[in-house]
Amino acid sequence: MKFPILTVATVLITAAMMALPQLHGLFYFESLPVISGEWWRLLSGHLTHTDWEHWFWNAAALAVLGLYLEKQSRYLWILGMLAGIASVNLLLLSDWSQVTRYCGLSGVLNTLLVLALFRYWRETGSAWVVAAAFICLSKLALELHSGTSLLTHITWPPYPPAHLAGTLAGLLLLLGMKLLFDSKLSPVAAANSRL
């Protein structure tokens, strides 16, 4: 089994960024600085967290989802991360966004969650995966309706539309892979066939 270098490195980078609170202001996604040319915030905003509890929940989810996906295909892991980051960034830069500052991996994690659930369902055919997907979508709907997080309480108010953007990115990525590759191949087999 290959070492999950991408997942471990990402968790360590986020921990290192948390350990440097004096630099957080340079890393958060903020609309005006990004528009003024501080493009690194489009990546660093996802790797920075408001507090250690926020970091812990995001790092734990990344460890579980990232390890599973990276074990299946590093290509799929990279596609998921890029699609999630791009979708959340597009939302944050759009007129639909209601926030000027954002940080954390939760939007991107929703992309990885969609990919992991679909991959595991294709692998096992388990009805439990369908039930888990329904629970995740219900949680997302409740958070969008209430504007709050159901499981965590962090320093900043949560931004559930980022979770929706990540979920949609995962679904669009799966659809794109189905259209691009033979429908008889699983997304992971299709991704691996491209390497």
Image (cartoon, rainbow, N blue to C red):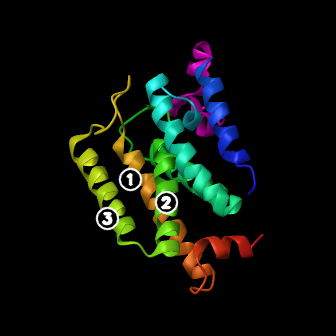
Mark 3 — residue?
131
* Residue kind at label 3, given as amino acid type: Ala
Question: Quick check: 109 above or below 120?
Answer: above
Residue 103 x %, y %: 49, 33
**Residue 69 among magenta residues:** no
* Residue kind at label 2, given as amino acid type: Ala
In this picture, residue 75 sits left or right of residue 92: right
Dot 2: few (<14), some (14–19), or many (≥20) neighbours within 10 Å?
many
Q: Quadrant of residue 28?
A: top right
Circle 3 — which element? helix
* Residue kind at label 1, given as amino acid type: Leu
Closer to us: mark 3 or mark 1?
3
Residue visible at 27% across and 37% down in the picture = 148
Q: Quadrant of the C terminus?
A: bottom right
- The rendered magenta stretch, by its main secondary structure, is classed as helix
Q: Quadrant of the N terminus?
A: bottom right
In this picture, residue 138 sits left or right of residue 101: left
Q: Residues in magenta?
A: 20-44
Mark 2 — residue?
169
Residue 10 x %, y %: 65, 39
Residue visible at 67% across and 40% down in the picture = 8
Residue visible at 57% across and 43% down in the picture = 63
Mark 1 — residue?
164
Circle 2 — which element? helix
Residue visible at 38% across and 53% down in the picture = 164
Q: CA distance from mark 3 to mark 1?
A: 19 Å
